[in-house]
Image (cartoon, rainbow, N blue to C red):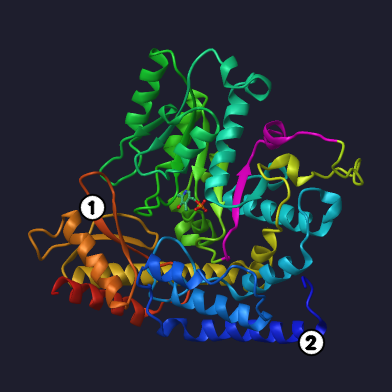
Amino acid sequence: MLKLDENARRELWQRLIEAIEQYHKSVATMKVAPTLNVEELRALLAPFDFNRPLGPGEALDFAVEGLTKYQVHTPHPRYFGLFNPAPTTMGIAADALVAAFNPQLAAWSHSPWAVEIERHLINAFAARFGYEPEQTDGTFCSGGAEANQTALLTALTHHFPQFEKRGLRALPAQPVLYISAQSHHSFFKAARFCGLGTDAVREVATDGQFRMDVEQLAAQIKEDRANGSAPFMAVGTAGTTSGGVIDELAKMAQLADDEKLWFHVDAAWGGAAVLVPELREAVGGIERADSITFDAHKWLSIPMAAGMYLTRHIDILSRACRITTDYMPRDAAGMGITDPYTHSIQWSRRFIGLKLFLSLAVAGWKGYEETLRHQAAMGNLLRRQLKDNDWEIINQTPLPTVCFTDRTRPEGRSSTYLESIARTVVALGKAWLSTTRLNPEAPVLRACLTNYDTQPDDVAALVSALNEARNC
Ligand SMILES: *Cc1c(COP(=O)(O)O)cnc(C)c1O
């Protein structure tokens, strides 16, 4: 029952391919977001007691219909959302292949080709970020949250030699780390998972451009040292989640250096800027980071999930993650290879790198450069059109995330009003965007160019839906 016969397989693959192609062709005509109704969904699933087997085609159709009707269509060209891309075609093919071959990426000897593909990619991206490829290590992750968690673990391991064996209780002082008020909240989770607790995270205020205020950072470090705490890590963000804002990375790198802190750059989305010559400078300083988080499933449009953690400390992942056991294969001992499970939080692991490898192999750096440039241009177009229609741009970034408020209304800067605008646009079904805050006093509407297929008419449609919502 688990393996279908050849005819049934052929029929299923055919149906699967047609469903994918059909979705691809028609997604642009769909309502971007569904109506949310939990009772309806539970009623739909209630008949599934798994006592009456379904035919494979019937089961597949059920899934296709469910996904079509009940999701925010992030692959829609009018989804101006949260860094969720339209997936690359090669990425979709790669993920299907990976499911079929099911390579095990814990041990090198089980999947040497797959492990070497990932190593090759880590080195290639290291070079793009300005690291010395031969002096770089890294691992593919489930996403930015795991990469940030890995960064925290490696920073603790590097800074506190006792941590590796004796844990936090062996440390003479309370370790503290620094993020900005606009950093991703996965650092709070990571602090909890590492046993530090969320109080160990210092949220440094941002400056007038919503970047980490580096003077404040310096003052906070001084104060913490005076209070007997042990600062060990500072996090800069290259492309904040709310505003796409880039911290002053070079300045932060210098301060971290002076203070002997591990400097991590969370470049989950914005790191892709290194692939575009005219955007590269905006993330200058990233090459000085001790470690970098990068999500290929964001701006590079790889299907979820494809996170990466990179570091220029070649020994640190091994120190943080390596455990040896008798039951793991040792067929490749002496070959100078690394078993991925010794450099990762994960053990059994899916082959994450293939979808990036095949996408990059087909598009090339040049193809990506042109695509990202197009998206940045669509971001600039959106900024211009919003200004022309009396929306006020609040964030400053060369990356295509646009935060704005309404100039035409006295309540145009209030969160209630802005949320109602976003809700109305989404309910109209014509586009998807959200609200966020750049600081507690700065609620904004937020539109991000996440889709490589978004064209000027899609941008115009968003602006016209916003204008319509304003007049509802
Ligand atoms: C998305 C994001 C994360 C979290 O990454 P996931 O892939 O969702 O786990 C971390 N940092 C930044 C800046 C992000 O934009």
Q: Position of residue 369 (x, y in %)?
A: 53, 67
The foreground one among 102 and 46 is 46
Some atom of ligand 1 lies within 8 Å of the CB belonging to the residue at label 1: no
* Vertical order, 124 against 96 (above or below): above
Q: Regarding mark 1 in the picture, which secondary structure is present there?
A: strand
> Is residue 405 shown left or right of residue 354?
left
Q: Position of residue 307 (x, y in %)?
A: 58, 53
Residue 405 visible to the viewer? no
> Residue at 39% across / 65% down in the picture?
38
Q: Can residue 314 be found in the magenta stretch? A: yes
User: Mark 2 — residue?
Assistant: 7
Quarter of the figure that contains the C terminus: bottom left
Q: Position of residue 465 (x, y in %)?
A: 25, 76
Q: CA distance from mark 1 to mark 2?
A: 56 Å
Q: Which residue is mark 1?
A: 443
Residue shown at 35%/56% (left/top)? 397
Quadrant placement of the N terminus: bottom right
Q: Which residues are magenta?
A: 302-325
The image quadrant that residue 325 belongs to is: top right
Q: Residues within 10 Å of mark 1 (few under 14, many from 20)?
A: many
- For the residue marked with disc 2, what is the amino acid? Asn
Relative side of 131 to 249, left or right:
right
Of labels 1 and 2, the one closer to you: 2
Q: Residues within 10 Å of mark 2 (few under 14, many from 20)?
A: few
Which residue is nearer to you in this view: 195 or 181? 195
Image location of residue 322, percent across then percent down: 74, 35
What residue sits 34% from the left and 43% below the top? 211
Mark 1 in CB contact with mark 2 (< 8 angstroms): no
